[in-house]
């Protein structure tokens, strides 16, 4: 086995696992699909283990060894990029308009903003928190330089850079009986939230009657209602914390949630790319509760 891992090969592995596609990884790295495939093969030869699951030339997923190396690769690349950034980006200056979905703050990603400000004090940040759909529209209109949003559904990942995938689950209090009630009591965000739309559609398709037990603007209010056992709510798995639990009995499955970085015309500005890289690194850090930080790379 080689004593040194090639940085470009590790970058190809990370890009391929994130995009769940050789072609999308090639687009992201500015290379051909065959070149990415060859890089992955060379990396597998270096470590002596298969890293990706392939079927008839298609990418089906990541092996256990691949997930292990993926974790190391992210940390190695992050340290490499931070070291390079200390010398090449220290003088970054200007204004950066950033939109964040509220769930971003729930994941403690607000601390990333503080770290970025400390590293690049001459970049003046202007932050906004709003619904993902509104943030996406503002990026497209040129009113924001970047946004970190949530996305659900079969939309092409090329429309934004997917940083993380995880299941959306039915959440409730640890000893709540609300899950057995009919109509099912729901705690939801107000109109416009994609979680609300998806949950209502899933229940309607499954023929399960429901009622709105709580509608609010913040996760804090929803958490209080769930802890009190008054309702259930659709949430990303990573937001359950240590006081809520996942409920599956008698409820329909929900789709995965993507955390996506969207950029506008200034997307290639190094300040934008550094902030996205910092968000991505934090998303992949394990969270301090069971099941809170397990990487989910979709095939």
Image: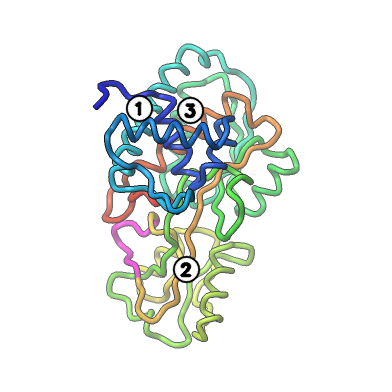
On residue 67, which mark appears? none
Which percent across, then down, holds residue 283?
41, 43
**Precedes in sequence: disc 3 or disc 1:** 1
Which percent across, then down, holds residue 117?
49, 26
Measure the alpha-carbon separation of dots 1 and 2. 34 Å
* Residue highlighted by disc 2: 254
Q: Quadrant of residue 131?
A: bottom right
Identify the element where label 1 is drawn.
helix
Kindly report which numbered mark, 1 or 2, lies closer to the viewer in this rendering.
Answer: 1
Vertical side of 242 occupied by 18: above or below: above
Outermost residue toward the front in this view? 56
On residue 116, which mark appears? 3
Vertical side of 189 occupied by 271: above or below: above
Vertical side of 213 occupied by 209: above or below: below
Please name the residue shown 55% across and 46% down the image: 260
**Precedes in sequence: disc 2 or disc 3:** 3
Q: Return the residue nearer the eye: 158 or 190.
A: 158
**Image color mode:** rainbow
Which percent across, then down, holds residue 162?
52, 45
Please name the residue shown 56% across and 19% down the image: 122
| Quarter of the figure that contains the N terminus | top left
Q: Quadrant of residue 228?
A: bottom left
* Residue highlighted by disc 1: 76
Left or right relative to 30: residue 84: left
Identify the element where label 2 is drawn.
loop
């Amino acid at each position: 086995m080689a004593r040194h891992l090639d940085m470009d090969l590790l970058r190809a592995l990370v890009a391929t696992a994130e995009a769940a596609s050789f072609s999308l990884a090639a687009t992201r790295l500015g290379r051909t699909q065959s070149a990415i495939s060859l890089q992955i093969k060379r990396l597998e030869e270096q470590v002596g283990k298969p890293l990706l699951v392939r079927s008839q030339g298609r990418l089906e997923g990541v092996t256990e060894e691949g997930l292990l190396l993926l974790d190391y690769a992210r940390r190695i690349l992050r340290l490499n990029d931070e070291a390079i950034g200390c010398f090449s980006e220290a003088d970054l200056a200007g204004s950066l308009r950033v939109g964040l979905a509220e769930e971003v703050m729930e994941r403690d990603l607000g601390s990333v903003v503080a770290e970025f400000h400390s590293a690049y004090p001459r970049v003046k940040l202007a932050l906004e928190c709003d619904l993902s759909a509104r943030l996406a529209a503002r990026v497209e209109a040129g009113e924001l330089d970047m946004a970190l949003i949530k996305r659900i559904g079969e939309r092409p990942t090329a429309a934004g850079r997917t940083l993380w995938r995880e299941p959306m689950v039915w959440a409730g209090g640890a000893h709540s009986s609300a899950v057995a009630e009919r109509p099912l009591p729901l705690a939801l965000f107000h109109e416009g939230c994609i979680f609300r739309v998806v949950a209502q559609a899933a229940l309607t398709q499954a023929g399960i009657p429901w009622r709105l037990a709580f509608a609010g603007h913040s996760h804090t209010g929803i958490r209080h209602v769930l802890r009190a056992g008054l309702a259930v709510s659709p949430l990303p798995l990573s937001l359950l914390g240590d006081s809520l639990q996942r409920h599956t009995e008698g409820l329909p499955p929900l789709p995965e949630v993507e955390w996506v970085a969207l950029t506008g015309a200034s997307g290639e500005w190094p300040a934008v790319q550094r902030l996205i890289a910092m968000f991505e690194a934090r998303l992949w850090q394990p969270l301090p509760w069971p099941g809170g930080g397990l990487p989910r790379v979709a095939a």
